Amino acid sequence: MYNSSAADGAANTVSGSRVFIYEVVGLRQNEETDKTNYPIRQSGSVFIRVPYSRMNQEMRRITRLGGKIVSIHPMNADGVTNGSSVLKMQASKSQGDGATATPATATSKGNAIKSDDQQPKTSETKGKPMTQAKAKESHADVPVNIYRPNAPFIGKCISNQELVGEGGIGTVRHLIFDISEGNLRYLEGQSIGIIPPGTDKNGKPEKLRLYSIASTRHGDFVDDKTVSLCVRQLEYKHPETGETVYGVCSTYLCHLEPGADVKITGPVGKEMLLPNDPNANIIMFATGTGIAPFRAYLWRMFKDEEKAANPDYEFKGFSWLIFGIPTTPNILYKEELEEIQQKYPDNFRLTYAISREQKNPQGGRMYIQDRVAEHADELWQLIQQENTHTYICGLKGMEGGIDEALSAAAAKDGVNWMEYQKQMKKAGRWHVETY
Ligand code: FAD
Ligand code: A2P
């Protein structure tokens, strides 16, 4: 049931006239809620209709009443929520029990089983050094720096959800910002800057931090009105004092309340763009929040609403995500990744490296580079196809190990991997964004 009475005073702007449906659990019945005209249940969800202009206020009210927002759906002009494309919240600080979670088709090592016809078609290219670089795609019309730090766009946080399940390590949040009022446009693989409030230790205004965009160009609601991020709260022990230090901007973002204004710059970046060719093969190596751009790619390739919104792009290639995370509850967007794998087993392969649950052949932590070594011959065959693009995103530390593993495979064909990689970079087929 929707609380229509909450819809009041919508501002006279594009975003101001928008209405969202909050799904809320845990609201307490008390004197204050007695005044509302929607039912409060002991358990289960209530749905509250919230105009954009009241998001902040409503959020505070819900918190005051002990409620927790579990989802936010935008409502379209017909009063219908865009339910099918709404973000599925992580829910589950209850999901993880520390057991190795792998897709239904996975081996006990978390390595997805691949059907025979999923084998990359490589026979024609086997062992051939890359002699001709295909022309690099032109990026002339890619939007960049629409908003600069001296005049940032003011977006509004409309959702901030935990992505790490119960028993997982740290905090990673999925944030959605409303950008409907401005002119901010972006493509999959780009980043935006966030300027946190306050001043740094020199008394100067805080500088922007970059974050990879986790949504497609159409946003999580496929209405071209939002941009999403996947942010880990930086937390470390000070090397000298041993005190716990929290990162400025990541802490600000991870604690941002729906309704809050946020200074956004950009977009920036042309390194991680997806090729326009829907037949391209896409290899993705991610650690942790490095998944962000790959979420955008995979949503573009496989999500029904996205496919409907992009009639000119029907992905027919082969994509392979190797994802490094510390524990099973840390598998960001797990449910949706595995859903794609189930639905498109011939076009999407999912391989986890769960460092603190799985062991590499040497008995150490299972890292991405160990998975690359395990599949090096296959990856090398795939990489040699001229329509294959490889992307690395996340921790810089993984790069050396990936090169080492691929060097060994290339050497079997008498190819110098580092030379080969250089050619791939020139051809715009080797893409790295590490931080
Ligand atoms: P700050 O307050 O700026 O602190 C960072 C500083 O802390 C470091 O410069 C270092 O001096 C110190 N420090 C950090 N770790 C340690 C340690 N272990 N020991 C000692 N000192 C330490 N982050 C995401 O969460 N998600 C993303 O999608 C994402 N995308 C990015 C994309 C790009 C292109 C780049 C460049 C970075 C991206 N980042 C992303 C990282 C992000 O920009 C910030 O760097 C991060 O959130 C930390 O910022 P902060 O303000 O919280 O930390
Ligand atoms: P670990 O922390 O167990 O050493 P997150 O961002 O959620 O912490 O995930 C990052 C993942 O990348 C973790 O599994 C982490 O393992 C792993 N990792 C840490 N250092 C490296 C490295 N040098 N190469 C590859 N993976 C790494």
Image (cartoon, rainbow, N blue to C red):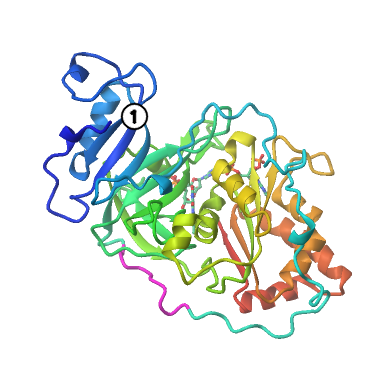
Q: Which quarter of the image is occupied by the N terminus?
A: top left
Secondary structure found at label 1: strand
Q: Nearer the viewer, residue 242 or 399?
A: 399
Asked if residue 79 lies in the magenta stretch, the reply is: no
Dot 1: within a 10 Å radius of its alpha carbon, few (fewer than 14), some, or many (20 or more) residues? many
Q: Residue at x 53, y 79 (%)?
A: 137
Give the residues in magenta.
139-148
Along the horizontal axis of the image, is 257 left or right of 277?
left
Q: Say whether residue 3 is left or right of residue 45.
A: left
Q: Nearer the viewer, residue 203 or 195?
A: 195
360 up-or-down from 283: above or below = above
- Foreground residue, 426 or 247? 426
- Left or right, 90 with respect to 256, comes to right
Residue 58, x across and y down, in percent: 23, 33
- Across and down, in percent, residue 291 comes to 56, 51
Check disc 1 and report the residue beneath it.
24
| Quarter that holds the C terminus | bottom right
Say which amino acid is labelled 1: Val
**Residue that protrudes farthest toward the top in the picture:** 30
Q: Quadrant of residue 37?
A: top left
State whether label 1 is within 8 Å of ligand 1: no
Q: Is residue 207 visible?
A: no
The part of the image, by quadrant, that contains residue 153 is bottom left
Residue 167 location, x and y as percent?
58, 27
Q: Give the residue displayed 31% in from the left and 46% down from the top.
A: 74
